[in-house]
Image (spheres, rainbow, N blue to C red):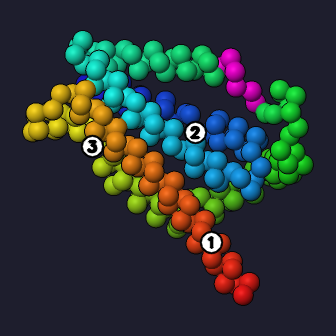
Amino acid sequence: MILGIFWVLNGFFQGFRFPPIARLLAYCIPPKQLATKMSVWQTSHSIGGALAVIICGYLVSFGWRWCFYVPAVLALLGVVWMWITVRNSPKDVGLPEIDEIEHKNNHKETQSNDDEYKQLLMKKIFKNKVIWILAIANLPVYALRFAVLDWGPTLLKEWKGLSLAHAGWIVAAFEVAGILGMLTARSALQISFLMVKLIEFA
């Protein structure tokens, strides 16, 4: 029960990472480059997942509790580093704002009328069929991903007789393949849009 509670809390607090980083990227990257940069940034959790199984594959020989202690310390060090180095906007470090006027206009439009903002939120997010389709499609993808991450090393150890360290590297390769697949899909999508525009132009 205790592990279950902490597992839920872990996922809950991990969700806090997205809003501030998404906001920071929007303020530091021009709109035309934002989608590509966000795609690259999204690989960070897969990189973390790959490193976690590799590190824990070696740590488990010292005791399974070390697979909790060491990642927690690394995460804490990362938080301290970000607290010291990350700034709210380019202006805070003496750089020009990216599309400062556009950001101000968007901010004014969002804050000017709460009712209008709520209607926009309902229309663009909660009543958006595309968002719901992507969310539902993402559910089995993540179920498979976490099944492989959580049970892959154990399966490879018990069924194939591999060491946990070796199994960790194999499961990490699964995460790396996911990164390559995501970036390839992104590139393929950009090429498709470009081809559509060329056909329309022709």
Does residue 85 belong to the magenta stretch? yes
Is label 1 in a helix, a strand or a loop? helix
Q: Which residues are magenta?
A: 83-88
Q: In the rendered image, which residue does mark 3 sit on?
A: 147
Q: Residues within 10 Å of mark 2 (few under 14, many from 20)?
A: few
- Labelled disc at residue 18: 2
Residue 133 at what x, y percent from top left? 46, 64
**Residue type marked 2:** Phe
The residues tagged by marks 3 and 2 sit, at their Cα atoms, a distance apart of 23 Å
- Give the vertical position of 103 relative to 184 (above or below): above
- Give the vertical position of 157 relative to 85 (above or below): below
Q: Quadrant of residue 174?
A: top left
Mark 1–mark 2 contact, CB under 8 Å? no
Q: Residues within 10 Å of mark 1 (few under 14, many from 20)?
A: few
Does residue 185 belong to the magenta stretch? no
- Give the vertical position of 156 relative to 139 (above or below): above
Q: In the rendered image, which residue does mark 1 sit on?
A: 193
Residue 43 at what x, y percent from top left? 51, 43
**Residue type marked 3:** Ala
